[in-house]
Each structure stands twice: as structure tokens, then as C-alpha cells.
Image (cartoon, coloured by chain):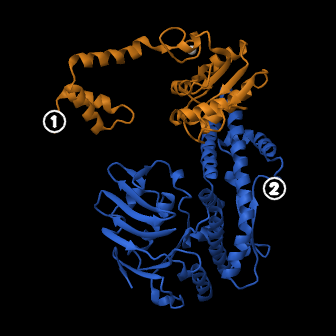
Amino acid sequence: MFLKWIKFENFRIYDSATIEFSDGLNFIVGGNGQGKTSVLESIYMYCTTKSFRTSSDSELVRFNCDSYSFDGQILDTVNHNLRIFYSLNEGKKTYFKDSKPVHRATEIIGKFPVVLLTPDDHSITAGYSLERRKFVDSVISQSSEMYLKHLLDYNKTLRQRADLLSKIRETGSRELIDQLDAWTEKLVQTGVELISYRRKFINELDPFIKKSYSLISNKKEAPSIYYKTISDDQTDLSRFFLAKLNSLQKAEIAKGANLAGPHKDDFVFFINGKELKTYGSQGQHKTFQVSLRFAQFFYLKEKLGKNPFFLLDDVFGELDTERSVAISDFLREIGQAFITLTDFSNFKFLKRSENDRLISVDKGSFCYG
Amino acid sequence: MQIAAPLQAVIDELSKFPGIGSKTARRLALYLLKRDISEIESLIGAISDLKHKLGFCTKCFNLSESELCVICANPSRDNTILCVVEDITDVISIEKSSEFNGVYHVLGGVLSPLNGVTQDDLKIKELSERVMRGGIYEVILALNPDTEGETTSLYLARLYKDLGIKITRLAKGLPVGGNIEFADEATVGKAVKGRLPY
Ligand SMILES: [Zn+2]
């Protein structure tokens, strides 16, 4: 895949600006608030329909304007013209692929795979389990439309079932209790699907994690991931899950909440058998975060048969020179990447080849050099 | 801008229709204004008949002009095969596919705690009466394969599982999370033909 150019209209800080990319490494350099992360944001939106910085599209409209848009062209097997348009008055965002409106995000997710590495990735290794589930879900969803549909189905079931449980608590209605069994069965069916996808994913990611980690760090350290779900036993998972829900029924009704299932899953990271979250150093956390993203890249590449776009937001500032050099050397081999930096002069160690492009961003305009 | 009140009234009424925005409503209203009065009266008559002449079949809750709908009243339909659907539009989709010669039962919705829809709001009691009365060999659960449709199917399958009746669901020719209404006729036809035991 090759993203050739993007033309912004009233998007974030941009009035009307076109940016042209190289099919190699694109270094996007600028001070804070000049619009460099917005470039990554727009690429991410082409790939996922959503921003990674905000859930509110109105925030993306330039001050005093009533709509934003950005057009762009991606060469996949053929050229695709992409356009995202948002109107503040209608409060509606429309994604056009080759001039045709896209009705569901599921039509786009996975078509143009993307990997994003940001300082926020810190929360994947150091934060709550929710962040790790988000990471895992986003990677599998890009490689399997089926998984994404199961996930949406499961989340809908969770909402319906939680609502039913609280209504049972309030009314004690026999009729509602009668209905609960069907929602429980639905939760088990969909939940078991999610668990089997996640287990398979963690197994398949393992060699990629080990490979990535060793590329970035020359220390003799072996990373691994343990998938913590309702049971390690895979053979009778449905029965086990159902029995667990039945034993929790009173508590679930009392709390009006779903107390067991893959929405409580966690992924525990280890280095040399020691839990990263408890025993890891800052450097080990950082290396693990970068390894996860590279592993995601290799995984998606293998599953989808194409190189995902690689987006790195302000990452080099946080890494020591040794790791930065390892990463930039490595990026060179993997296709098109977009790297934001606050100041290129601090990154002399980044070897540049002819195919790389240095793009300076200043108050919403671009210059190349 | 001021618009004559009778015209504005029509625009406002038309804007309530699904898929009709204010611009389209204005265009339609102006179109109506240009029609002959006889055409308008015939349209009004047709719309009014919808409500006055059409009711629901007392057996299957499909649309009907009399106590029994054309399908229930047809002696050549197979009364031993009962196809349970969510809505009247699903009856139309399956009928168009011409793959099904049994009879229907229209539930009038699916279970949804969030929308406050429970068993009592659906024609489940009536369905159970039909099933318990006997003479039914197979119940096809043809609800939309979305979260609520599938859960309602699970509910019904549990309800009738010990009756010795064959319970089937549509084959997964249908897109997951999709609506039967939006599937093309060939897909619906294939799904009805290739139905699977529940
Ligand atoms: Zn009928």
C-alpha cells in the first residue's frame, strides 16, 4: 500500500493544504500545535474511520468553519480515492471510497491495515486491563471482519443483559427472569467465540513479539504473554462459562451487571518469566510497547498479505539512541511509515536514504526539504 | 421565507416519513400540488384504505383484509411448517423468494430489554398456543441474525425444545448482523432452502 497524498480542507489547523508522501519513510517535523499529529490522525481515520485522539468530530473542524474534509489517494492493487467529509450542521460524517459512501465501519476496517505507536501506548503495559483488551481487539478486528462482528454482537449482548439484570433487581418479575436464560446462552455463545479468537491470536503473536523484542533490545530478554480468561481449559469452555454465570446469578442481579466473561479478560506481559507490570523497568516497558506494535505489524502483514501503514507519533523523544537507531533501521525494510518529530536536529542518528522525505509543518502549511 | 400554510402542512407531514428530509418533502409537496385533483383523491383513498381495509390476520398476524390472511386461507399451503418472523416485511421478502410453502407467524418484534420489549409485547403466547395445539411438524426461526433476533430465537428454541418438534433456523446465507429486509431474493431463497436444525 502506498498513500500518495492528502488534501485537507478546514481540518484541525489546516485551511487548505496538500501533503505529498514518499513510499518510504516520511518524517513529519514541527513544533507542538503546528499540525503534525493531525496528519497521522487523518491517515488513521482512512484506515479505521475514527480518530485516535478524540471521539468528537466537531473538534476536528477548523475554528469558525462549518465542515472539514480530506481527500487522499491510496495505491493498493489499484488506486483508491478516499474522502472523509463532516458537516457541523448535520452533525454527520461521511466516508467515501471511490466516490461511493461507505455505510458501515466494517466495510473499511482491515482494508487498509494500520499500526499506530504513540506515547499513550504506555497504558497498554502499565494501565488497566481495558487498555490491553482494546489493543488485542483492534488488532484482531483489522485482520478478521468476523471477529469484529462477534465483538459488536457481544458488546450489544452485554448492554442488553445488564439492563435486564437491573430490571430484574427492580421488579423481580418472573417474566424477565424467564428471559434471562436466553440472554445468558447468547452471552456464552458469543463469548466463547471471542475467547477462541483471542487465544489463537496470542499464540500466533508470540513468535512476532519475541522477534520484535530481540530486534529492538540487544539484551538477552524473552518476552511472553499469558492470556487470562475465565478458564485455561478449552475443551468444555461453554459448559464452564455457563456454570459460572449460573453460580453468579444472584450477585449479577444484585449488582445489575455482567460479572463474568471475556469483557473481564486480561493479557499479562512477562519478561524472562517476571511480570512486567510489577517488576519491569521504564526501559523494559518502552521496549515491550514498541515490540507489541512491531508484532502487530508482522501479524497483520501475514494475515492480510500487505504491509500496514506504520504511524509513529513522537516516539523517538522517549527512547534512547540505541533503540531509536534499531527502530529506524528496521522501519526502512517495512514499507511506508509516517514519523512525527518535534525537531530533526536532535535525530542525526536517523540515517536518511534518498527515498525518505522530510516534511516540515508550520502553522498548517507544509514544506519539503 | 414564508410558505403558504397548507403547503407547509404537507411538507411537515411528509418530513415525518423514513428517509425523507425537508428538501425531498418540499419537492414531493410541490409535485402533489401540480397533480390533478382526481389523482390526489385516488392517492388519499388508497392511503385511507390502508388503515380502514387492512387489519391483522387473527392466526399469524400478517396483514390481512379479512379474519384470515391470504396465506392462512390458502388450502394448498402446508400448515405443518411454521415460519416465525419478526415483521410483516420479512413475510414479503420470503414470499418473494417463492421457496417456502408453509405458513407464518409474525412476532411483531424481538426481545430487547433496552427498548423495554418483553415476551408479553410479542405474539409469543399466540405462537405457543399454535404450537401446543399440535399438527405442527417444523418451526423455522427466521428472525434477523442480529443480537436481539438471535437471542429471541434462543428463547423460543428453549421454549419448544421438549415438544418433539423439529426446530430449525435459516442457513447462514444471510450476512451476520444483517436484515432479512435488505437481503436480495436469491439470498433469502437459499437461506430458507438450506435451513439448519437449531
Ligand atoms: Zn395469516
Residue B112 visible, this angle: no
* Nearest the eye: B157 or B44: B44
Crowdedness near tag 2: few (<14), some (14–19) or many (≥20) residues, C-alpha within 10 Å = few
- The residue at label 2 has a CB less than 8 Å from ligand 1: no
Image region (quadrant) for ligand 1: top right
Q: Is residue A320 above or below residue A263?
A: below
Q: Same chain, marks 2 and 1?
A: no
Q: Any mark on residue A232, and which?
A: 2
Question: Residue visible at 34% across and 73% down?
Answer: A364
Question: Residue visible at 21% across and 28% down?
Answer: B7
Q: Amino acid at mark 1?
A: Gln
Question: Residue visible at 51% across and 59% down?
Answer: A48
Q: Any mark on residue B2, and which?
A: 1
Instruction: Tell me the element at label 1.
Output: loop
The C terminus of chain A, quarter of image = bottom left
Q: Which chain is orange?
A: B
Question: Residue visible at 41% across and 60% down?
Answer: A81
Instruction: Tell me the element at label 2.
Output: loop
The chain letter for the residue carrying disc 2 is A
* Nearest the eye: B21 or A337: A337
Judged left or right of residue A230, residue A156 is left
Q: Is residue B115 above or below residue B119?
A: below
Q: Quadrant of residue B52?
A: top left
Q: Which chain is blue?
A: A
Residue B50 visible, this angle: yes
Question: How far from the left and from the top, in percent, is residue A363?
Answer: 33, 76
| Disc 2/disc 1 C-alpha distance (Å) | 70 Å
Q: Amino acid at mark 2?
A: Asp
